[in-house]
Image: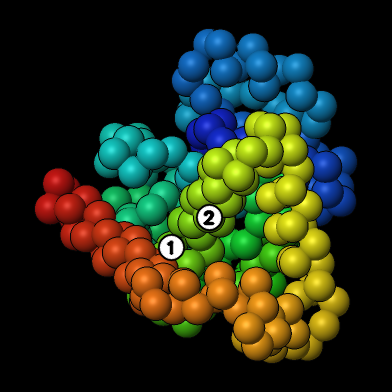
Amino acid sequence: MNILVIGAGNMGLAYAKAIAKSKLLSSNPLMILDKSPDKMEELKTIKNFQVYSELESCVSKADVIFIAVKPYHSEALMRDLKPLLTEDQLAISIMAGVTIQSMQEALGINKVLRAMPNLPAQVGKGLTSFTASKEVSRLELSMVKKLLETTGKAVYLDTEKGIDASTGISGSGPAYVFYFMQSMMEAAKKMGFSDHNSKVLVEQTFEGAIELFNQSDLSPVSWMNKVASKGGTTRAALDSMEDNNIRALIQDAAFAAFERAIEMGKELELQD
């Protein structure tokens, strides 16, 4: 299998490194393309990469093409890609808001997948949701899932609406966690802890809570009830969150990201 990754930004490079280290390519090097001279020099230092700067030099060699550029670069890129592609090739987009139909029309091929990764893919703990056009076979879906899971876990979704929805949960979700962590660290510093100790307190608390959750079948609510006792400190904190409607505000934030993902898709379609 020959893989080409177009775009060596955060997510493109995360996938490229993970796939190149896996056993999925056999002895084939991973092909990666980026236009930036500085980025190309960086890529040339990475083992198992074959680096390109021009589409004409590598597209015809690829069985699977990851498109990992910013959405606003998509129109020009797909216009240049179109005459170089064949119906046998598979295109996987990790561009937010760019629909499968628009990619099929712009690329002139039918086998198109749309994926939504998240930032922890950079450390092998990512979650990628993906969906595909009807022309993609079950065997090809299985192969793509293995490629995506080189960066963590992958979940197949039946519809593109699910991709937009996952943007609001897993795609943008790490930022919500960081927001909560930052708030807790600021509270710790106000209580008199140093910057270092504030970070350690919050970091270890999150890591420990997630490990407890992962090693049991208990729901988050059950774990909250285990920690909180009537009239205790944890119950005081949880009651404060409930009184301030924090649960609903977090849900509102997730839906705001979901709705923005849909809007971005419509805006990109209007630009075509």
Amino acid at circle 1: Thr
Q: Residue furthest left?
A: 270
Q: How is the image coloured?
A: rainbow
Considering depth in this image, is 190 or 83 the residue closer to the camera?
190
Please tell me whether mark 2 sits on a helix, a strand or a loop. helix
Amino acid at circle 2: Phe
Measuring 80% from the left and 31% from the top, which residue is drawn there?
48
Tell me residue 100's x, y (percent).
36, 64
Report how many numbered discs are placed on residues in the image: 2
Q: Earlier in the sequence, mark 2 or mark 1?
A: 1
Tell me residue 190's x, y (percent).
55, 41
Please tell me whether mark 1 sits on a helix, a strand or a loop. helix
Which residue carries the number 1 mark? 167
Measuring 51% from the left and 49% from the top, which residue is drawn there?
183
Eyeballing the image, is 10 above or below 154?
above
Quadrant in the rendering for residue 266: bottom left
Q: Can residue 219 be spotted in the picture?
A: no
For marks 2 and 1, give the CA distance.
Answer: 18 Å
Q: Between tags 2 and 1, which lies in front?
A: 2
Q: Are the residues at dot 2 and dot 1 in contact (C-beta closer than 8 Å)?
A: no
Eyeballing the image, is 41 above or below 270?
above
Q: Residue furthest front?
A: 231
Considering depth in this image, is 102 or 178 the residue closer to the camera?
178
Which residue carries the number 2 mark? 180
Tell me: 19 left or right of 121: right
Measuring 80% from the left and 62% from the top, which residue is drawn there?
208
Q: Crowding at label 2, few (<14), some or many (≥20) Cα neighbours within 10 Å?
A: few
Eyeballing the image, is 222 above or below 261?
below
Measuring 16% from the left and 48% from the top, which residue is drawn there?
272
Tell me: 131 left or right of 251: right
